[in-house]
Amino acid sequence: MGKKRDEMKEEKKKKKKGKKACCEREGLRKGAWSAEEDKILVDFITQNGQTTWRNLPRLAGLLRCGKSCRLRWTNYLRPDIKRGPFSPDEENTIIHLHSTLGNKWAAIASNLPGRTDNDIKNFWNSHLRKRFSGEVLDQTSSLSKSVDTKHESPQTRLLVQSENVRVETAESHLSSKSEDDYLLCLWNSKVGDSFPSDREGAGAQSPASQTSSYIRTIESGSRARNLSEPCKKTSFPGETDQKVKLLNCKKEAEEFGSNSDDSKSDDSSDTMLKILLDFPMGSNEMEFLQDPFDDVSTGTLH
DNA sequence: AATCGACTCAACCGCACTATC
DNA sequence: AGATAGTGCGGTTGAGTCGAT
C-alpha cells in the first residue's frame, strides 16, 4: 500500500489549509503525551481541580493547548477510567444503545461507567460496525422514511410531540442511570410483555432488534421521530423543562381534541394513545417512564 | 528477516452548543 | 441582540503493533 498511501497523505496535507489548530497558532506541543506531561497534568488537577481548560496548561506549566489537556484527562488520565477489553455485557449495552441512539457516543458512554465516548467509538468502529452497521442502517433509514408528519392531523402531531418529550425524558434518565442496560430491562420487564403483537413471530430476533421493532411500531403509528438523531448535541434537556413541554403538549392535545370532530377518524393517534396509556407504571425499575403529569398534577414538579 | 496489510487506539480537528458580556 | 469564550462532541487521522506471506 505504501506509495499510494503516501500520495494520499500529501494530497490531504495540501488540502488542509485555512484555520490553523490552536496548538499550531500558539506554538504548543502536539502528538503523544509523555509520562512527564501526564504527571504534571494529573498533579495539577489533583491539587487544583479542573479550572478552565484554557488556562490550565499555562498554570500547570504545560506546553499544550487546553483542549488537548481536557482530552488527555477525560479520555485517559481520569482515575475512574476502566481499561482493558469490553465485557460481553458492555458489548451488548453498546449494541442496544447504538441501535436506538445512533452515534451518540457520549450518551452511550454515560451508561457504561468507566468507559469514555472515545473508547466506545473506537470499539464500535473496530469491532462492531462491520457486524451491525448494515442492519442498523436499514432500520434507521426505514424509521426516518416511514413517517411523514406533514400528512398527519394536528391532533396526531400534538400527540407526536407529547411522545417525543416522553421519549426524550426516558433517554434523559437512561443517560443518567449508569449501571443497567435499560433496553434489556425494558424488554425483560412488563413493558416488554406489553410490546405489541408480533413478539412471538419475532422469536428469532435479538432483544435489540425486537426493541427497535417496538419503537418502530410507535413510530409508524404516528410520528416522525428520527431515532438516529434522538437529542440535541451535548446534553439531554432538563427534566423540568420536559415536564413543562409535556404539560403544554397535553393541554394542546386536549383542547384540540375537545374542539375537533375528527378524533374518531385517526386510527394512528388512537393506537398511539393506547400504547401510551397501556404503558405499565409503578414502583419498579422502569419508574423513569412514569407519566410526568402525575407529578405535575400533584404539584410535585421537581 | 523483510515486507505488507489489517487493525487498534490516542490524539487531533472542526463544528455546534451554551454561558457570559 | 450580537459577539466572544469555553466546552462538548463526533468524525477522522496516523503512529504503532501484530500476524500473514
Image: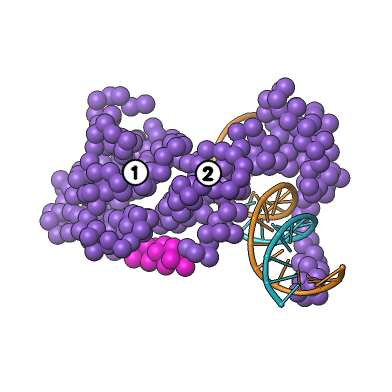
Chain colours: A purple, B orange, C cyan
Q: Is residue A59 left or right of residue A219?
A: right
Q: Circle 1 marks a residue in which chain? A: A
Question: In the depicted view, which residue is nearer to us: A279 or A13?
Answer: A279
The total number of labels drawn is 2
* Helix, strand or loop status at disc 1: helix
In the depicted structure, whether residue A101 falls above or below residue A172: below
Badge 1 crowding class, 10 Å Cα cut-off, few under 14, some 14 to 19, many 20 or more, is: some
Which SS type dominates the magenta stretch? Answer: helix
Residue type highlighted by circle 2:
Ala
Residue A251 location, quadrant: top left
Question: In the depicted view, which residue is nearer to us: A178 or A82?
Answer: A82
Q: Is residue A73 left or right of residue A295?
A: right
Q: Which residues are magenta?
A: A134-146
In the depicted structure, whether residue A292 falls above or below residue A24: above
Question: Is A112 part of what is drawn in magenta?
Answer: no
Query: What residue is shown with label 1?
Result: A185
Question: Is A136 part of what is drawn in magenta?
Answer: yes
Q: Is residue A71 left or right of residue A301?
A: right
* Helix, strand or loop status at disc 2: helix
Instruction: State which tag comes first along the sequence, 1 or 2.
Output: 2
Query: What residue is shown with label 2?
Result: A109
What is the distance, in whole Å, between disc 1 and disc 2 at their CAs? 18 Å
- If the image is split into quadrants, where does the N terminus of chain A sit? bottom right
Question: In the depicted view, which residue is nearer to us: A139 or A94?
Answer: A94
